[in-house]
Amino acid sequence: MKKATVFADIHYPLGKVDDKMFSSFTEHLGRCIYGGIYEPGHPTADEDGYRTDVMDLVKELKVPVIRYPGGNFVSCYDWHDGIGPKENRPKRMEYAWSSIETNEFGIDEFCRWAKKAGVEPMIAVNLGTGSIKDAGDLVEYCNHPGGTYWSDLRIKNGSPEPYGIKYWCLGNEMEGSWQAGHLSAEDYAKKALEAAKIMKWVDPSIKLIACGSSYDTLPTYLEWDRIMLKDLYDQVDYLSTHNYTMNAGQGLTNYVASYKQLDEHIKNSVKVLDYVKVQSKKTKDLKICLDEWNVWNFQDIKLDSLADLSGLTTFEMTSAGKWEIAPPILQEKYSLLDGIVVGGLGISLLNNCDTVEIACLAQLINVIAPITTVKGGGVFKQTTFYPFELLSHYGRGTAMKAVVDAPSYDTIYGTCNLVEPSVIYDEKTDEIHVFVLNAEETEETELTLDLQGFGDRKLVKHLALYGDDLEAINTIEEPDKVTVKEMKVSGTNTAVLPKLSFNVLVLK
Ligand code: AHR
């Protein structure tokens, strides 16, 4: 059995994990909203048509913030279409995913659902085909108490109290030609700056998120951020970036090491933030809003690697026929291996908590998601539900600097330690929660925790996601094929990590 030691010291904190770290994202895409959140007539639907079986699972995940309504969708979306009496709402061609948008569900339905689900909405405005005035009007509709056209309309539409939406995304992935209304960095900076001005005039308390670079395959990667941040820096609070990991084309060892790629991706965005801050002599710090991250294997189409995506329109990435309502697209079936990799990605988020304040698992229901529903039927947890749930439950508190003494191995992302940890001190419970990815593929690893200054601590709980069949998936027929297993604990500071596993160790 290989051996590894993780060292952490109470005097060396890395940073506080923000409560918004394990947030998520719901887009008008496929069956995420229609048939996911909302299915009037479903046996579990409440008086508003919200599926309560889905809402229960969202609550189980303790998701703090949910981004809405897109994604690529938002750049084609006119929010006015989704308010008022449902019978008057127009059906539109939705270009991003070549679907029909019925507009039965809009901003009011989302905010009411969010309230019931106990989550905070984070709203993206359309800076592609939309105008800066539309963005200001939406802030007025959502946040102004009353006595003006848009706020009174919200009241008339059944919401007397303002929604008080704090977090606003200035568009989505505006760097990419796949985006409706895509702009150059210079043009985005101009438009986003004017939108930001208006939005803050309407409600000065809001926090704004600028679209940064997401795809290192684009020639504008990071250069986009440098250019637009020079103008936008003072107006915004966060820099957005997205990062998806894919199994195909890299082999098991590299795929498991994807956390390292995410780590580098985050650090690249931080470098450009630092550069602009220093170069423009700014004093405030912007934080990272990783408002889309996940494993995405593009199972609707066949891909050999992520690079094959370049040049595709967004709907060419799906199995969508043309102009269907809520087509069952991007309904990924996640394997045990995908679940373990998601756990590793979560470890990278925690280990970057000094710069990442908001991170949204993309997405939440049916579309590249941990929750899958059957139309008119049940709901089940994908394998990725479990690591996300563990991260959300145990990943709160202060992340400590962790040092690893372990055998290493080489990957396309650089040299990695056999075990990748994140050590969290939860002040509320006075517990230490250690997340560990064990990348050893053939045998168990014995892990010793050397935690200085925390007093006498013993391992009281060990939860692990692992198994012999890495391709195993959950289905509605076999919903519990892959779940988290409770391991035997030694009552010491040593744990045996199953081969290729994602673990949470609780020390009291
Ligand atoms: O999450 C699916 C899509 O991925 C989003 O619409 C877009 O922002 C990203 O490219």
Image (cartoon, rainbow, N blue to C red):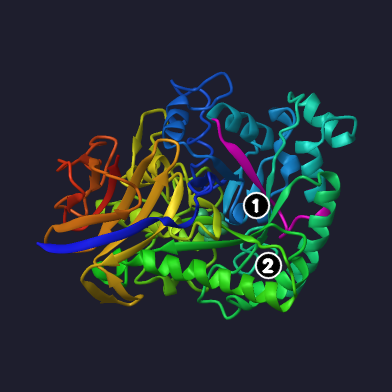
Residue pictured at 34% horizontal, 35% vertical = 380
Return the disc, 2 or 1, that comes first in the chain's sequence: 1
In terms of image quadrants, where is residue 65? top right
The residue sitting at the top extreme is 47
Residue pictured at 61% horizontal, 63% vertical = 173
In terms of image quadrants, where is residue 294? bottom left
Query: Residue 24 location in percent, x, y?
Result: 51, 46
Q: Left or right of 325: which side holds 205?
A: right
- Give above or below for 95 relative to 62: below
Query: Residue 134 location in percent, x, y?
Result: 80, 49
Query: Residue 196 location in percent, x, y?
Result: 79, 56
Q: Kindly identify which residue carries mark 2.
A: 182
Q: Is residue 316 magenta?
A: no
Range of magenta residues: 118-134
Please tell me which residue lies in front, 185 or 51: 185
Q: Kindly identify which residue carries mark 1.
A: 74
Residue pictured at 18% horizontal, 50% vertical = 495
The residue sitting at the bottom extreme is 219
- For the question of whether residue 300 can be seen, the reply is no
Helix, strand or loop at mark 2: loop
Please tell me which residue lies in front, 316 or 77: 77
Question: Label 1: few (<14), some or many (≥20) within 10 Å?
Answer: many
Q: Is residue 123 magenta?
A: yes
